[in-house]
Amino acid sequence: MLALTPAERRGALVLVVLLLLGAAHDLWHAAGARSHAPSDASPAGDRTGAAEPPGPAAAILRPAAAAPRLDLNRADARELDALPGVGPVLAERIVQQRGRFGPFQELDELLAVRGVGPRLLERLRPRLTLGAADSSPPARAPDVKRRR
């Protein structure tokens, strides 16, 4: 029979514990997604009467439509930094891109900013709007193919 050394037993135990934690994490997320999904019982899918969790989780679970939309062409770096997934460095890059190439004509032009990928753009799309441009753009941002 194959005997394991004490170090091998500890390593195997660590692997089993990590696998169990990962499985529990996946189940927790799956259960959370089901509990926050709109009920099929109501035709409009509204959740009237459903209690929203208190505290910071309520802000995370609240639909993005409830948050005010930010004008991408008028927002400063501080306002952009408040968006989810955007930090101070990325906010400054967005402001610099707007300064270099003029106001954004489409939200997809954010992909030309280093650090903004398709996933972040889709997360920001419901929170952003494009207001009227203050001035004509000096040059258009180049079409950049995203690296994978």
Image (cartoon, grey):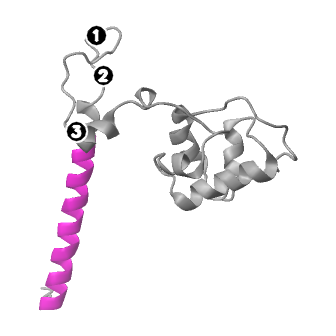
Q: Is residue 61 left or right of residue 10?
A: right
Asked if residue 142 is among those painted magenta in the image, a careful observer would answer: no
Q: Is residue 125 left or right of residue 15?
A: right
User: Regarding mark 1 in the picture, which secondary structure is present there?
Assistant: loop
Which label belongs to residue 38? 2
Q: Quadrant of residue 65?
A: top left
Q: Residues within 10 Å of mark 3 (few under 14, many from 20)?
A: few
Nearest to N terminus: mark 3 or mark 2:
3
Q: Which residue is mark 3?
A: 31
Q: Is residue 37 above or below residue 137?
A: above
Kindly report which numbered mark, 3 or 2, lies closer to the viewer in this rendering. Answer: 2
Nearest to N terminus: mark 1 or mark 3:
3
Residue 61 locus on image (x, y percent)? 32, 36
Q: Which residue is mark 1?
A: 42
Q: CA distance from mark 1 to mark 3?
A: 20 Å
Residue at x 46% of width, y 47% of height? 84
Residue range in magenta is 6-30
Q: From this viewpoint, which residue is outermost toward the right?
A: 138
Kindly check if marks 1 and 2 are in contact, taking CB atoms under 8 A apart as contact: yes
In this rendered view, identify the residue nearer to me: 16 or 85.
85
- Which three-letter amino acid code belongs to the residue tagged 3? Ala
- Which three-letter amino acid code belongs to the residue tagged 2? Pro
